[in-house]
Image: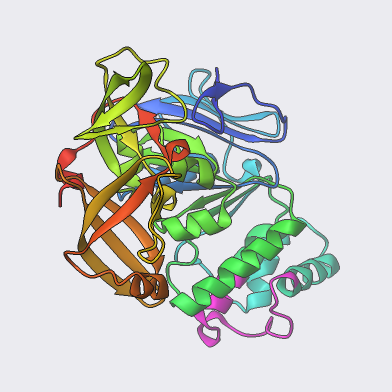
C-alpha cells in the first residue's frame, strides 16, 4: 500500500519508526484517509466538524476499528482489518491528551501522572512522575488536586501523564480549546519547546488553522472522512491541491480562467486580463478552462506616490470595495472590472499612507510565480461577494 507524501502524492515510507494510517469504510462513519507522521514530527489533522478528525485519533489509539485498512507504528502493525488483527489500547503505548484532560479529581497532580508508570517499582514511580511534572513546568504543584489548578495547569498535568508512559505516539485532541487565548498561546509555546525533548510522532486534532500553522510540520486536510492533502503549512497555503482544499483552508482568491496565446506566448485569460504564469500553462491545451489561486502575499499594491512603470508582472487597476481594520492589519477587498474580488492584508499604516478608502481606484501586480493552477472549477460566487 502506498502512503501520502508531503504534496499529497503517494510515496514509500522512509523511516521505520513513523506512524502510518490508511483506513476506509463507507459508513456508518465514512472514512477514506491516509497519512504519515515521522518521528519528532507534529502532524495536524484539520477540517470542519464531522470530517473524521477525532474518529481517526481514536482509530490510532485502538478505541475505534474501521472496516478496512491498517495502522502501523515503528514497524509494528497495530491494526489490520483484513487480518482481523487489532492490538488493545494498552499494548499500543499511546500517550493521549483529551479535550477535557480526563484527570481523576480525587487524585493529586503527582498521583495522576503516576498512573502512567504503574509498571515501575514504587520508588521509581514518584521520581518519574516528578521528572515529567518538572518538564512541563509544574515543580512544586504535584500535591494539588485538579480543582486547585488552573485550566492551563490541568492541561500540562494531562500532557505529563501522557508522556510519562514513554509512548510510541502522542495524540492531542484539541488540547488547548478549554483555555483562554493568552493561556493557549503560552501552552502552544511550551508544547513547541517540549517537542525538542521527544522524538516520537505527534498527531494534533484542531479546528484552529492558526494553531496548526504555528505548531505543525505537516497538515492533513480532511473532509467527510477523506484526506484531501497532506503537506507543510507553507505548501498547503500556497499550493492547495484543489479548490475544495483551498476553501477548507479559508483561502479566498480562487478564480476561473482559460488557457490562451498572446503574441505566441501562453497566457491565462481572466476576464479582460491576460496573465503571465510562471509554471503550469505549457502542459495544458489551448482553450482549457482551469481554476487558479493566488496567495494574498503575491498581490503587490503599487504606492500612490510612486506609480509603477510596468516593471512588475500582471499589473491591473481595481477598485477598493471594502476595508476592514483589525488593529495593525487592514483587510482589503478589491473588485476588478469583470466583478471578481481580490483579497489581501496590508499593514494599517501602509493603508493610510496609500490613502485607501472605499471606491478608490488602485493599481496592483499579481506575481506570476504565485499563480497556482488547479483542476476543477472555482465557485465564482465566492469571488464576487
Q: Quadrant of residue 215?
A: bottom right
Q: Residue at x 43, y 37 (%)?
A: 368
Q: In this rendered view, identify the residue nearer to me: 313 or 251.
A: 313
Q: Position of residue 31 (x, y in %)?
A: 36, 32
Q: Position of residue 120 (x, y in %)?
A: 80, 58
Q: Which color scheme is applied?
A: rainbow
Q: In this rendered view, identify the residue nearer to me: 188 or 57.
A: 188
User: In this rendering, would 82 be left or right of 378?
Assistant: right
Q: Position of residue 50 (x, y in %)?
A: 30, 46
Q: Is residue 142 magenta?
A: yes
User: In this rendering, would 53 be left or right of 121?
Assistant: left
Q: Quadrant of residue 161?
A: bottom right
Q: Residue at x 35, y 26 (%)?
A: 25
Q: Quadrant of the N terminus?
A: top right
Residue 224 seen anywhere in this rendered image of the structure: no
Residue 19 seen anywhere in this rendered image of the structure: yes
When the figure is inspected, residue 341 is found, relative to residue 10, above or below; the finding is below
Label tally: 0
When the figure is inspected, residue 322 is found, relative to residue 89, above or below; the finding is below
Q: Is residue 9 magenta?
A: no
Q: Residue at x 37, y 61 (%)?
A: 345
Q: Residue at x 57, y 74 (%)?
A: 186
Range drawn in magenta? 135-156
Q: Position of residue 136 (x, y in %)?
A: 69, 71
When the figure is inspected, residue 381 is found, relative to residue 194, above or below; the finding is above
Q: In this rendered view, identify the residue nearer to me: 261 or 35.
A: 261
User: In this rendering, would 70 be left or right of 346?
Assistant: right
Amino acid at each position: 500500500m502506498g502512503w501520502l507524501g508531503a504534496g499529497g502524492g503517494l510515496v514509500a515510507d522512509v523511516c521505520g519508526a513513523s506512524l502510518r494510517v490508511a483506513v476506509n469504510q463507507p459508513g456508518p462513519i465514512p472514512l477514506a484517509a491516509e497519512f504519515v507522521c515521522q518521528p519528532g514530527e507534529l502532524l495536524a489533522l484539520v477540517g470542519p466538524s464531522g470530517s473524521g478528525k477525532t474518529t481517526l485519533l481514536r482509530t490510532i489509539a485502538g478505541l475505534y476499528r474501521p472496516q478496512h485498512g491498517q495502522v502501523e507504528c515503528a514497524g509494528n502493525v497495530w491494526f489490520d482489518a483484513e487480518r482481523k488483527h487489532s492490538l488493545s489500547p494498552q499494548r499500543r503505548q499511546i500517550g493521549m491528551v483529551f479535550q477535557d484532560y480526563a484527570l481523576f479529581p480525587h487524585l493529586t497532580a503527582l498521583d495522576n501522572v503516576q498512573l502512567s508508570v504503574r509498571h515501575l517499582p514504587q520508588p521509581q514511580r514518584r521520581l518519574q512522575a516528578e521528572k515529567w511534572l518538572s518538564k512541563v513546568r509544574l515543580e512544586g504543584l504535584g500535591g494539588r488536586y485538579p480543582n486547585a489548578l488552573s485550566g492551563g495547569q490541568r492541561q500540562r498535568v494531562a500532557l505529563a501523564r501522557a508522556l510519562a508512559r514513554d509512548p510510541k505516539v502522542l495524540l492531542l485532541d484539541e488540547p488547548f480549546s478549554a483555555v483562554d487565548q493568552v493561556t493557549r498561546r503560552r501552552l502552544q509555546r511550551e508544547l513547541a519547546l517540549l517537542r525538542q525533548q521527544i522524538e516520537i510522532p505527534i498527531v494534533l486534532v484542531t479546528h484552529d488553522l492558526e494553531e496548526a500553522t504555528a505548531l505543525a510540520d505537516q497538515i492533513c486536510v480532511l473532509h467527510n472522512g477523506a484526506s484531501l492533502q497532506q503537506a507543510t503549512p507553507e505548501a498547503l497555503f500556497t499550493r492547495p491541491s484543489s479548490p475544495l482544499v483551498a476553501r477548507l483552508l479559508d483561502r479566498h482568491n480562487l478564480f476561473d480562467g482559460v488557457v490562451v496565446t498572446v503574441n505566441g506566448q501562453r497566457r491565462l485569460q481572466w476576464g479582460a486580463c491576460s496573465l503571465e504564469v510562471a509554471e503550469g500553462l505549457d502542459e495544458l491545451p489551448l482553450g482549457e478552462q482551469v481554476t487558479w489561486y493566488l496567495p494574498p502575499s503575491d498581490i503587490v499594491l503599487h504606492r500612490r506616490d510612486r506609480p509603477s512603470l510596468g516593471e512588475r508582472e500582471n499589473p491591473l487597476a481595481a477598485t477598493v470595495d471594502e476595508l476592514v481594520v483589525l488593529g495593525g492589519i487592514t483587510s482589503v477587498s478589491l473588485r476588478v472590472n469583470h466583478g471578481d474580488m481580490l483579497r489581501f492584508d496590508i499593514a494599517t499604516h501602509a493603508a493610510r499612507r496609500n490613502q485607501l478608502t472605499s471606491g478608490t481606484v488602485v493599481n496592483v501586480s499579481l506575481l506570476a510565480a504565485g499563480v497556482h493552477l488547479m483542476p476543477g472549477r472555482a465557485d465564482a460566487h465566492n469571488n464576487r461577494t
